Amino acid sequence: MEAAIRERLDNFIRRKGLRQTPQRDEILEIIFASDEHFTPDQLLERLRIAGTKASRATVYRTLSLLLEADLIHEIELGDGQTTYDPNFIDHPNHNHLVCIDCGKVVEFEDSHLDLQTECLTRRLGYRAVRQSLRIEATCERLRQGGSCSDLIAARVKGKRLPNRKK
Amino acid sequence: MEAAIRERLDNFIRRKGLRQTPQRDEILEIIFASDEHFTPDQLLERLRIAGTKASRATVYRTLSLLLEADLIHEIELGDGQTTYDPNFIDHPNHNHLVCIDCGKVVEFEDSHLDLQTECLTRRLGYRAVRQSLRIEATCERLRQGGSCSDLIAARVKGKRLPNRKK
DNA sequence: CTGATTGCAAATGCTTTGCACGCCA
DNA sequence: TGGCGTGCAAAGCATTTGCAATCAG
């Protein structure tokens, strides 16, 4: 984890008159140990595996905090749970493509696209603060080749597929 | 409401071996009486006002049906409830701009943007099925002129603002 | 008739909250 | 020491579901 992240949270905490606690440290540590998306449940599981003791309530409360400090973003994957993305610090303008065959999420950036939406927004009389483009798509590999390693991996993990509650 | 909509549902119902019921008719009628977005709750209220008797459960079940028949789309407004958009029949590729000052939702279309994302998707090895671009933005009118009629309207209606649960 | 559909209430699943205790500043 | 933060369990909300009665075809 980059030092810049901890510093950003520390500043936020100080500015708000909040407190540094072991739980908050541990949660921050786990989240930014990878650049993977996660749900509150997944985060809790990672914490359990790492042997830390933060409760579910604290996890939710800390997520709100990190959201407010703009260290993570909420993203909508269409599976009925809120997913958090820790990757907006390194890639502030990235978007998501969700494969509806296997649920795989591909991140991508495109400056041309950003420019385009920025112009559109201004033309409508607004100033863009945040944008999220979500593309739902089917896998060409699966459609043409009959198989896709991501789908197999998803089945193995018993992953919850998009647009399917439960 | 255009006849094409009812026909589309009728076909769907026949094809699936389902049944035409007064509740489904009434819900369809109310939804397509306008091109406004709605939450399940708002729909239920409109039904109550119109004096129809469909229950909450039936509303939810019918929404799933209409979703499957592709007569409505789910859109994500970030206020903790699912919002439905009946306007994709007339405008299949439209996107949404949400004003974070007042919650107003502006719909817009842009073929250049569509082309752009289509190319991006193909380059990533996928085939786009659906895309949703949501822009969160602040109102220039409010920022520069100090007021915005949409904000006043939202306050009058006690509207739930985006990114605020409750 | 037969099976799809409905309404009701109970259940579900995610998230938030009230409260008493503990701990950071 | 004064609050903020935590854990727990209970509460909240939107949505889904089991079931018996009802209705469409």
Image: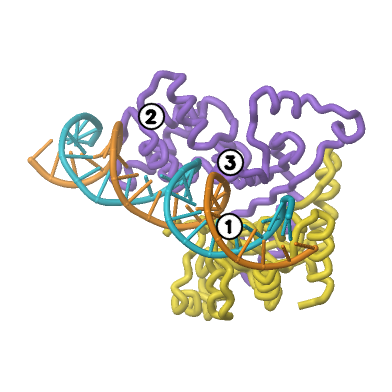
Chain colours: A yellow, B purple, C orange, D cyan
Q: Is B115 rendered above or below residue B151? A: below
Q: Is residue B124 visible?
A: no
Q: Is B7 rendered above or below residue A59? A: above
Mark 2 neighbour class, 10 Å CA radius: few under 14, some 14 to 19, many 20 or more: some
Parent chain of label 1: A
- Residue at the spot 70% in from the left edge and 59% down from the top edge: A73
> Where the C terminus of chain B falls, by quadrant?
top right
Parent chain of label 3: B
Q: How far, Cα to Cα, is label 3 from label 2? A: 19 Å
* Rendered image quadrant of residue D1: bottom right
- Mark 2 lies on a secondary structure that is helix
Q: How far, Cα to Cα, is label 3 from label 1? A: 25 Å
| Residue B51: percent from left, percent from top | 40, 19
| Residue A154: percent from left, percent from top | 49, 75
Q: How far, Cα to Cα, is label 2 from label 1? A: 34 Å
Which amino acid lies under the numbered mark 3 shown in the image of this protein? Phe
Decide: marks 3, 1 in contact (CB < 8 A)? Answer: no
Mark 1 neighbour class, 10 Å CA radius: few under 14, some 14 to 19, many 20 or more: some
Q: Is residue B109 left or right of residue A161?
A: right
- Mark 3 lies on a secondary structure that is helix
The residue labelled by disc 3 is B88
- Mark 1 lies on a secondary structure that is loop
The residue labelled by disc 2 is B25
Give the mark toward the camera: 3 or 1.
1
Mark closer to the chain start, 3 or 2: 2
The residue labelled by disc 1 is A82
- Residue at the spot 59% in from the left edge and 30% down from the top edge: B35
